[in-house]
Each structure stands twice: as C-alpha cells, then as structure tokens.
C-alpha cells in the first residue's frame, strides 16, 4: 500500500528568563529534585515490565494506566516502527507515525442491487425460470397464477432506486468513489438500465450485470438476492471496503467514511442484539413458495457455529452494510462449497433455504476472527512461554493463579470489586480520530470495541457446564431457554464472569503432578476453551482484558514488540478490528394506503434524526391498492428528496 504522511501540528512553548536570585535558585532546586524522583520512579516501572503484578489482598494501589490518547507511552517502551503496534498494545497514538493512503480514508465504493420487476422482458424470463425451479413444481400444477402474484411482489419496482441515489448524492457525496448498480441481463449483453438514468462521461455510476460477476454462468439468470450477494467480490474495480445498499435503503443524514471503517477502530458493524439468530438449521416447509431471510440467517449461523462454537448470534441491523472484498474472498476460501451452492440457487428457498447470508456472515466472521486471534496469541505467546507447544506446570500455574484471583474479585459486591483502570479502546474516540484528520458525521455512535473483549459474552455464564443451544426442560418439566448474551452494549466494567478452571481447562491442566501437557492435548484444550465451550473462551478473554492487576492488550499480545510474532498478530488484529455502532434508523413495510400514509408522515417529521431508513413494499397484488400506495409513496419521496441527481434525464 502506498502511504502519505498525515501532517502533525505541534505547539511550541516559550520560556521566560530567570535572573539569578535566591528565589530562582530555590525553584531550580525543587524542579531538579522532582525530576530526579520522577526519573527514578519511571526507571523502576520500566524494569518491572509487563510482569508487574499485585496480589488481590496486597492493599497496594493499582498500577498506573499504560494508556493515553494524548501522548506516547515512554515507560520501558521499545518503539515499534509500525504505528499499529503502539495503538493496539498501548492505546498510544502519534499522528507523525500514522501513514495511510489518502483514498483509503476518504473514499469507498457503494454497491446497489436492483432489478425492474415490472419490465415485461424480465417478467417473461422469470416465469420461464419458475417453471423449471424445483421449489415451484408442486404448486405449478395447482395454482400457477397464485405463484406469480405471490412472487412478483419481491421484484416490483416503485422507482425507489432513483430516490435512493438522490439520498446518497445528498448525504454521501464526500464518501463514495463509485456507485455500482448490480442488475440482471434481460437479453444478451443487455443489462437492465433505469429508464430515467443518463450515463455521462466520467460518471461515477456504473451498471454491472449479473453476467459480469457470476463465476459460474450456468447459475444465471438469478432471482435470488443471496446468490447475487455471494458474488460481490467479483465486481470489477471494487474498493477493498465498500458499502452495500438495496434500492429501498435511504440515507437520511450525512455519512462519512468513519460511519463505515477507520484505520484505528476497523469496521463499523450495526447489530440488533435484542434479536438473536439460533445456531440451528431452520425447519423447511416443502410446500412453501416464498422463503424469508431467516432460513439463510440460521443456516449461516449453523456454519459459523460449526467453526467457532454454537452460540446465538445477533441479527444484523436493517441499515447499510459494510463489506470487504478481502474478507469475502477469505470466507470463500474456507466455505467454497457452501458459497457455490448459494450461487446455484436461482430462487430463494431452493436447497431448503440453505444459503449464506453474506452481510450477517461477514460481520460475525470478523467478530469471531478477532476473538480467535486474541485467544490464540495468548495461548501461543504468553501462556506457552517458550513456545514449544508443550504446557508445563510452571506455565499453567501462572494462568491458574490469575484466574483464581479474578474469581475472588468477581465474588465481591459491586462497590468492593476492583475494576481495571484502563480506558476502553473507544474512549475519546472522536478526539482521537480528529488528531489524524478523520471526522465523525454524527450519524453513528461507537458503542463497543472488539478489542475490549467479545461483546456478546453470555450474561453471568455458568462455566461449570456446557451451555445448551436449544430450549431444554428442567426437573419440573418447565422450559429452560438457552443462556443469552449481554445485549445492550454493556461496557466491560458492567460485565461479569467466573471461570471454572476444572471444567474449562480439564483436570490434567490443573494437576501439578502432571508435569507436561503434550502438543496435541494442548491443542485440544485450546479448541475446547475457545470454541466447543465458547463461554469459557469469552470469560478467559474478559480476564485477560479486564483483570484489574495486569489486564489489557499486553496480557495477550506477544511481549517482544520487535519479533515476527508481534508483527504477525498486529496484522491480524488490524485485519479483523471492529467496533459496534448504533444509528437512529427506521424500517417499515407498506401494507395498506392508510397505514403507509401515517408511517411516512411520521418519517417526515423525524427527518432530522433518522440516519437511515428502509421502506419495503409488502402490499398485495391488487391494482387499486398498488395505485394508492404508489401515489402516497411518490409524494413522500418527492418531498423528502426533491432535488434530481445529475444522472437523471430531464422530464
């Protein structure tokens, strides 16, 4: 990557002269005395290094915070040539060392998916494909007309794209580099083009046909948005990080790159933690002719659970989604067959709804990979001190002692429980971003960083047993739902966990008479803690990050900042870094004229507050209802986005 230094403004102080006088001599003596003591203190601290540790009952004060957003840490610090090493380990930031290609910070591409389902050529093509699709075979013999009226709502065009583009140009003109409109071909080399669209020279808007991006052309034509999304990484010339929108997504307020990604905080993910996706495959109705997104969500979580542990995962919010070409290619390399099957399903519901939901999958893949990187780094470089893969008793005893002290502290009342004094990674994040020239729009609030621990750990998880992932019966026959995670962005100081050493790590790990755990057994124990009993791994990560005596990034990053191991881990952290963000947004479905008018009027009243809104049409195939709703909807859109974009034909 090419780099351009971000300028740094330093403030120069000035000194006043001091004449020779008893007052100045006394002042000089006091300053020298303080400087000497400060130097001696820092020398002691630097010698104590990362193993500085206090027992829970020592009565001594906690070590000073190593983290400061205003200055670099200098106590015993071996400066890393990579600014990311300083940032991730010490939360120390020197703008002079942050070098980043300007375009990486200011411009991302936007991808739209759109089809004009009202186009007669598209309708003919769709009906022909339905006749050969297995999901419609039974119903075709019974009521072919019902199939058509039910499915065509999914492709109905109400001119949303025109106004969505207006919203994007109004609110993200300083955000995007190009806009790619991904659409179907209705004839050879003839992709659909909006009737109002004007292609101008050097226009940032490109029409991209499905034929251009599908690796397997035999899967076309496709009417399955999940299949189309699975091919996004093949869009020519797409920026590594991009924003994905459907044509019924609208931007209500200004959007800036910091709403999507920053070099300090990584991806900005919008999740709905109050809505959880189970890690089980959803039952499928063989007579269904329409299938919602929950089949793909649950199948995606099933795949993630096979790899990272069977947990309920948060629904991804109905706002614009951040996606990444390198991440999608990485996912493709690990799940090639599943993505190929998703691509092959022409209609949603084929293959019993076993499609990958790309936006949900990538968001949670990033979250899991950062967690995995943190735990692996601790296991390989901090627990296994000599990195021979074998865990001897002395290595195991250290982490057991830390866990036991943590558990004692967790048993204390809230007022008596010690807390880590380290600021969270998102502390003062606006000011920190400003220091490197990145502004926040105000449309998104950063709520939690993955570097502060896994955000969706189970609330007060019982780490003495396996967590059931489905509803079970208690001794009295009553339903016992699975344990659920924290879900309202509780900060680390408000979260609690206790780590059952015997259950999570096993009897051999804590047995002092078992001198050496061999390599393969150590790998099995790690897999158990990190994935099979995921709540153990979440709690262990919480201990490493939030332990009031020695927590923070230094508890799991390699100690030697000049080592290849340190550089490798830092690169992985940068690759999977993320924050959870929230924005004020609305999602509505237009079902009837009266309700649509009321909902849209409310949206107009709140237009100064809604960063995003999504409007689905979900009304029946009735010409009268359709005409009423289209009239109301167009009036709303013309009022909300009255200025035509430069890419619309003059009417």
Image (cartoon, helix red, strand yellow):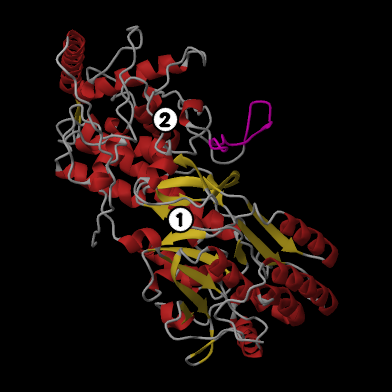
Classify mark 2: helix, strand or loop: helix
User: Where is residue 396 drawn, in percent x and y?
Assistant: 25, 24
Query: Residue 337 lies in what quarter of the image?
Result: bottom left
Residue 106 highlighted magenta (yes or no): no
**417 displayed left or right of 371:** right
Q: State which quadrant residue 395 falls in.
A: top left
Vertical arrangement, residue 60 with respect to residue 355, above or below: above
* N-term mark: 2 or 1: 1
x and y percent of residue 31 in the render?
20, 15
Task: Name the residue: 47% across, 15% down.
Answer: 411
Q: What residue did someone put label 2 on?
A: 539
Q: Residue at x 51, y 47 (%)?
A: 581
From the image, tell me which residue sits under label 1.
260
The picture places residue 460, in percent across and down from the top left corner, at 52, 27
Question: What span is colored magenta in the figure?
Answer: 472-489
Q: Is residue 6 left or right of residue 325?
A: left
Residue 333 makes an appearance in the image? no
Residue 474 in magenta stretch: yes
């Amino acid at each position: 990557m090419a780099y351009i230094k971000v300028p740094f403004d330093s403030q120069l102080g000035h000194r006043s002269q001091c004449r020779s006088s008893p007052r100045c001599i006394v002042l000089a003596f006091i300053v020298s005395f303080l400087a000497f003591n400060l130097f001696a203190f820092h020398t002691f601290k630097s010698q104590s290094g990362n193993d500085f540790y206090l027992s829970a009952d020592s009565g001594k004060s906690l070590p000073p915070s190593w983290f400061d957003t205003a200055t670099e840490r200098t106590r015993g610090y071996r400066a890393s040539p990579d600014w990311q090493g300083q940032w991730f380990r010490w939360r120390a930031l020197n703008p002079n060392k942050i070098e980043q290609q300007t375009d990486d910070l200011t411009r991302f591409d936007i991808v739209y998916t759109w089809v004009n389902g009202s186009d007669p050529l598209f309708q003919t093509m769709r009906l022909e494909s339905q006749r050969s699709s297995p999901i419609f075979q039974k119903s075709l013999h019974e009521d072919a007309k019902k199939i058509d009226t039910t499915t065509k709502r999914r492709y109905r065009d109400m001119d949303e794209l025109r106004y969505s583009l207006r919203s994007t140009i109004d609110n993200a003109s300083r955000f995007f580099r190009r806009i790619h409109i991904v659409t179907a071909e209705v004839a050879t080399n003839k992709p659909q083009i909006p009737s109002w669209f004007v292609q101008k020279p050097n226009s940032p808007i490109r029409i991209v046909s499905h034929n251009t991006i599908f690796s397997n052309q035999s899967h076309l034509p496709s009417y399955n948005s999940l299949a189309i999304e699975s091919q996004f990484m093949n869009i020519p010339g797409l920026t590594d990080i991009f924003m994905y929108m459907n044509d019924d997504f609208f931007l209500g307020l200004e959007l800036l790159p910091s709403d999507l990604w920053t070099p300090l905080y990584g991806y900005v993910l919008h999740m709905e933690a109050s809505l959880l996706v189970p890690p089980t495959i959803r039952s499928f109705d063989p007579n269904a002719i329409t299938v919602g997104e929950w089949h793909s969500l649950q199948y995606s979580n099933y795949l993630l659970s096979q790899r990272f542990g069977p947990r309920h995962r948060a629904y991804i919010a109905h706002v614009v989604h951040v996606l990444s070409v390198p991440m999608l290619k990485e996912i493709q390399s690990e799940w090639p067959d599943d993505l190929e099957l998703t691509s092959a399903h022409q209609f949603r519901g084929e293959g019993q709804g076993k499609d990958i939901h790309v936006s949900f999958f990538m968001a949670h893949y990033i979250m899991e990979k950062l967690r995995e990187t943190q735990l692996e780094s601790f296991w390989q470089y901090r627990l296994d001190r000599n990195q021979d893969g074998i865990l001897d008793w002395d290595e195991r005893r250290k982490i057991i002692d830390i866990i036991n002290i943590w558990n004692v502290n967790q048993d204390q009342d809230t007022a008596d429980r010690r807390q880590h004094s380290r600021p969270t990674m998102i502390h003062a994040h606006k000011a920190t971003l400003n220091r490197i020239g990145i502004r926040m729009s105000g449309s998104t609030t950063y709520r939690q960083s993955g570097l502060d621990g896994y955000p969706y750990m189970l609330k007060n998880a019982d780490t003495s047993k396996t967590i059931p992932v489905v509803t079970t019966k208690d001794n009295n026959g009553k339903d016992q739902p699975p344990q659920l995670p924290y879900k309202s962005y509780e900060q680390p100081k408000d979260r609690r966990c206790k780590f059952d050493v015997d259950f999570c790590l096993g009897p051999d790990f804590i047995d002092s008479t078992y001198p050496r755990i061999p390599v393969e057994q150590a790998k099995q124990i790690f897999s158990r803690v990190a994935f099979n009993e995921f709540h153990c791994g979440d709690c262990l990560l919480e201990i490493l990050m939030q332990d009031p005596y020695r927590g923070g990034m230094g508890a799991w990053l390699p100690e030697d900042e000049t080592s290849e191991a340190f550089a490798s881990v830092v690169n992985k952290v940068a690759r999977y870094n993320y924050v959870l963000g929230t924005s004020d947004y609305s999602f509505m479905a237009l079902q009837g004229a009266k309700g649509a008018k009321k909902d849209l009027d409310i949206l107009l009243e709140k237009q100064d507050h809604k960063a995003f809104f999504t409007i689905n049409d979900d009304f029946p195939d009735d010409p009268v209802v359709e005409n009423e709703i289209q009239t109301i909807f167009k009036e709303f859109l013309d009022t909300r986005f009255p200025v035509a974009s430069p890419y619309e034909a003059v009417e």
